[in-house]
Image (spheres, helix red, strand yellow):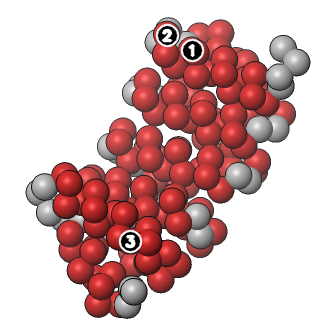
Amino acid sequence: MCDEEKIKQYIMHLYDPDKKTREDATKSLVDCGKMAVLPLISILDDPEWTVRYRAAEALGMIRDERAINPLAKKLKDPKDHVRYMAAKDMGYFGNKELSISLLPLLKDDNEYVRRIASVSLGILGGNTAYNALLKAAESEKDERTAEAIKDAIIKINPNI
């Protein structure tokens, strides 16, 4: 059972130096569901990237629409891990309109960010995502990312 005090404790565990403790706290916050959304949103701008990453991860897994705009802002986070998680989260929401916010990430410096943006675009679908993925496929140098782009294109249009 979650209450405000439990949520505060779980949030504090996101600051723990131990990765497993942070992971367990994230799972507990996801289990708390909608009650944890606003406290998680409030730490999305924390100076510590691991906290931003875990907060974004939990918000994506909870899938509460109040988190969409705050998570979309994290697509421009200076830390690639946070951009990765925010891009992954956009796919969870299943709203085609979110694909616009992912398009710049197809040119991100980090191949993991480009790859997960491609995966999310494939999930979201639509003409905008499809055309952007086709263009990205022309210039992608990383083999695994190119494969993710190809898979996303096929997911959107299986007749290729």
In the rendered view, tell whether residue 19 sits above or below residue 132.
below
Q: Is residue 135 visible?
A: yes
Which picture quadrant has residue 12? bottom left
Q: Earlier in the sequence, mark 2 or mark 3?
A: 3
Q: Quadrant location of the N terminus?
A: bottom left
Using the numbered discs, state the Cα–Cα distance from disc 2 to disc 1 in whole angstroms: 5 Å
Which picture quadrant has residue 102? top right
The local crowd at label 1, few if under 14, some if 14 to 19, many if 20 or more residues have their Cα within 10 Å, is many
The local crowd at label 2, few if under 14, some if 14 to 19, many if 20 or more residues have their Cα within 10 Å, is few
Q: Nearer the viewer, residue 23 or 56?
A: 23
Residue at disc 2, secondary structure: helix
Contact (Cβ within 8 Å) of mark 2 with mark 1: yes
Residue under label 3, please give it.
29
Q: Tell whether 152 sits left or right of 83.
A: right
In the displayed image of the protein, which residue is found farthest to the right? 159
Q: Amino acid at mark 3?
A: Leu
Q: Is residue 52 visible?
A: no
Q: Position of residue 11 (x, y in %)?
A: 28, 73
Q: Residue at x 52, y 45 (%)?
A: 88
Q: Tell whether 22 sits left or right of 159.
A: left
Q: Position of residue 17 (x, y in %)?
A: 11, 57
Q: Nearer the viewer, residue 113 or 155?
A: 155
Q: Mark 1, mark 3: which one is toward the viewer?
A: 3
Q: Quadrant location of the C terminus?
A: top right
Residue under label 2, please give it.
143
Q: Amino acid at mark 1?
A: Ala
Q: Residue at x 62, y 39 (%)?
A: 120
Residue under label 1, please give it.
146
Q: Mark 2, mark 3: which one is toward the viewer?
A: 3
Q: Residue at x 73, y 23 (%)?
A: 153
